């Protein structure tokens, strides 16, 4: 049976059914546009309430989680309206462990940066999704870079930030 593409979305893509949105948030061995990927050991912790950012406006929504037989994972959000031409999302990850594939270095919250991480593929081991952004079509590249920077800043706060806390 051929599954129509508009029903099962690809990684970081969405499908819309009536008033609900389905998003693929984990697809094994697919690299996201800002170079994150997942394997069969990746664990997604289900964060029930997720921030959704759309056109500079952020609100909180309940996320329902589903898995398919290939261990890909999806989030469904009910009662959320977006422009029909929006096709992809940019997730913001919070990880308890991840691997820099360039340096083969595992990070678990206590390690130092192995490289700039901005262009290295990052294998996510254990994570939750803290925010989902519906980017404007004209600023996708900027939004992807912003999400990567947020990830690096979140997991490697610099020394000055630590003093401030
Ligand atoms: Zn590295």
Image (cartoon, grey):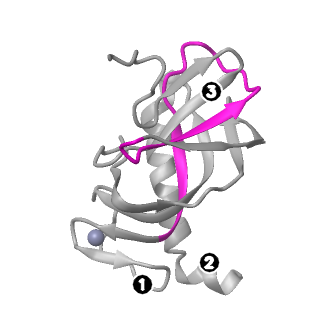
Location of mark 2 (residue): 161
Query: In this rendering, is residue 5 above or below 135?
Result: above
Location of mark 3 (residue): 21
Asked if marks 3 and 2 touch (Cβ < 8 Å), the reply is no
Mark toward the start of the polypeptide (3 vs 2): 3
Q: Residue at x 71, y 52 (%)?
A: 48
2 vs 1, front mark: 1
Residue 46 drawn at (x, y percent): 62, 56
Q: CA distance from mark 1 to mark 3?
A: 37 Å
Residue 18 drawn at (x, y percent): 68, 14
Mark toward the start of the polypeptide (1 vs 3): 3
Label 3 environment density (alpha carbons within 10 Å; few <14, some 14–19, many ≥20)? some
Query: In the figure, is residue 143 to the left or right of 56?
Result: left
Query: In this rendering, is residue 103 above or below 137?
Result: below
Residue 66 drawn at (x, y percent): 56, 42
Outermost residue toward the front? 1
Residue 127 drawn at (x, y percent): 51, 62
Quarter-wise, where is residue 31 in the image? top left
Label 2 environment density (alpha carbons within 10 Å; few <14, some 14–19, many ≥20)? few
Counting labels gives 3
Location of mark 1 (residue): 111
Q: CA distance from mark 2 to mark 1?
A: 16 Å
Query: In the figure, is residue 32 to the left or right of 136?
Result: left
Q: Secondary structure at mark 1?
A: loop
Q: Secondary structure at mark 3?
A: strand
Magenta segment boundaries in residue numbering = 69-96
């Amino acid at each position: 049976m051929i599954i129509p593409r508009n029903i099962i979305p690809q990684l970081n893509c969405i499908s819309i059914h009536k008033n609900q949105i389905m998003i693929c948030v984990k697809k094994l061995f697919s690299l996201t546009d800002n170079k994150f990927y997942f394997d069969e050991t990746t664990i997604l912790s289900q964060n029930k309430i997720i921030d959704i950012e759309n056109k500079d406006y952020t609100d909180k929504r309940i996320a329902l989680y589903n898995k398919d037989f290939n261990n890909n994972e999806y989030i469904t959000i009910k009662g959320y309206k977006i422009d029909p031409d929006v096709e992809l999302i940019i997730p913001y990850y919070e990880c308890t462990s991840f691997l820099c594939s360039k340096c083969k270095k595992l990070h678990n919250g206590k390690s130092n940066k192995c490289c700039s991480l901005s262009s290295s593929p990052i294998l996510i081991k254990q994570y939750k999704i803290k925010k989902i952004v519906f980017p404007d079509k004209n600023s996708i590249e900027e939004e992807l870079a912003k999400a990567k920077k947020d990830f690096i800043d979140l997991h490697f706060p610099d020394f000055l930030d630590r003093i401030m806390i």
